[in-house]
Image (cartoon, grey):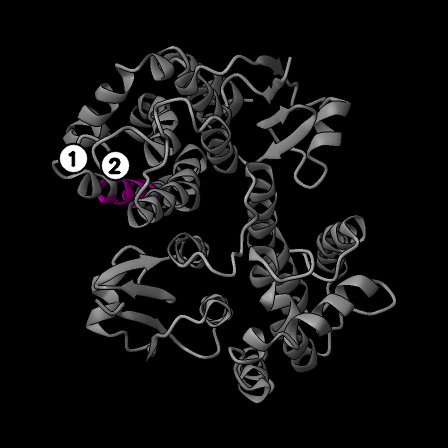
Amino acid sequence: MDVILLDFWISVFGVRVRIALAEKGVEYEYREEDLQNKSPLLLEMNPVNKKIPVLIHKGKPVCESNIIVQYIDETWHDKSPSLLPSDPYLRAQARFWADFVDKKIYESAKKIWTAKGEDLEAAKKEYMDLLKVLEGQLGEKPYLVGESFGFADIAMIPFSSWFYALNQIGNMKIEEECPKLAAWVERCMKRESVSKTLPDPHKFHELLMMRLNK
Amino acid sequence: MADEVKLYGFEESPFVCRVKIAMNLKGIKYDFVVENLSNKSADLIRYNPIYKKVPVLVHNGNPISESLVILEYIDDVWREVPILPHDAYGKAQARFWAKFIYDKCSPALMKAIGSRGQKQAVAEANEQLRFLENELNVKGTVFFGGDNINLVDISATFIAFWLGAAEEASGIKLLTEDKFPKLVEWGDNYINCQAVKDSLPPRELVLSFFKKLFGKA
């Protein structure tokens, strides 16, 4: 198989790549990694970070989910849809927001799992403020940048599978407080690439509770 | 219609310098608007409400933030003297190394220096530098971009220029010739590139910044 994806079933970063591959209709071989016992192939293909996802295309590795998504868009550029806008300014916006998800959303959500008391309240506020930023960016638009589903949406949509767990653990009401974001999630879920790929939020919550109670 | 390009920043910032280098490399004319981070201008806050940081590039009234995003935007708009390879795989490799330098390498270097040479921190820093040294060895070229500088070289400006000043200010030496000969050679060649020379701040400014940071002013 020309395209191999080294991944972990519930990884939000892996999901990004799976969505992009599905959007482009690219056939690939999915290989599940045991993160407690990483395969020699993973360590060989990503010696620097030793992390998934790794896309192996004709034997050559591409690492880092946002970088992989761009690679997929550029390599299968003749297959629609385009995942990045053609206009340079909108492209920059898409990159900015995908980077924002990495720098801010991911780190902030993680704090909610482990924080207690005052720290938990602070973590929740920080996270909700960040979601409200996305809410503002959406405005009246159907997607995060421009009128079509793309790079920034792909970067963020996997994190919506965490909303249920965050609501439970953090005693939050994400969908109520961010109605535009909630509508955006529903809109993205209408795409097969997303609905067939996103981990079940309840399964994620279950797994997380097991991990936290260890 | 003439392009209006403004760069908001301050001289001591390695991130601002990256953008200057790319623009000087491509011969882009721009206005430099000096920002004082303890007294941010209304414009900066308007153009970068999310992070309120520099650099911010404003092109014909449109703001772009985050240095790597700005560098790719510049490369998309001003196509002469490209800083990214043409092929998708080459681009992915360049983006990977640029991200590595930002996410892992530079923080590890600053941690090693900030911790005053704590053993574990130094070992971490050496491990990250080793990855870059290996990459240069494997490529066998002067620069990460080959014969000419590219996105990766520009991302590593901190290592080529700021690190030396931080080392001098703190007394902690990380990037030594015996351990990292290729990287040291790269640094020397890099800061002698015209576009880089034209963009670097005076060394005294950077040295004084680090001396203050380490309480040795």
Q: Can the viewer see residue A173 in this picture?
A: no
Number of residues whose C-alpha sits closer than 10 Å to that of mark 2, classed few (under 14), some (14–19) or many (20 or more): many
Q: Which residue has dot 2 on it? A: A144
> In the rendered image of this protein, does residue A180 appear above or below residue A194?
below
Direction from residue A95 to residue B98 in the image, left or right: right
Number of residues whose C-alpha sits closer than 10 Å to that of mark 1, classed few (under 14), some (14–19) or many (20 or more): some
- Name the residue at 64% across, 25% down: A56
Direction from residue B59 to residue A203 in the image, left or right: right
As measured in the structure, the alpha-carbon distance from the residue carrying label 1 to the one carrying label 2 is 7 Å
Q: Which chain carries label 1?
A: A
Direction from residue A104 to residue A189 in the image, left or right: left
Q: Are marks 1 and 2 in contact (CB under 8 Å)?
A: yes
Have a look at marks 1 and 2 and say if they share a chain.
Answer: yes
Residue A162 lies, in percent from the top left, at 37, 25
Indicate yes or no whether the magenta region holds residue B99.
no
Residue B3 lies, in percent from the top left, at 27, 67
Q: Nearer the viewer, residue A143 or A9?
A: A143
- Name the residue at 36% across, 29% down: A82
- Name the residue at 60% across, 56% down: B152
- Looking at the figure, which quarter contains the C terminus of chain A? top right
Q: Can the viewer see residue A62 in this picture?
A: yes
What type is the residue that disc 1 sits on?
Lys
Residue B142 lies, in percent from the top left, at 74, 62
What type is the residue that disc 2 sits on?
Leu
Magenta span covers which residues?
A123-133
Residue A80 lies, in percent from the top left, at 36, 22
Indicate yes or no whether the magenta region holds residue A126.
yes
Query: Which dot marks residue A141?
Result: 1
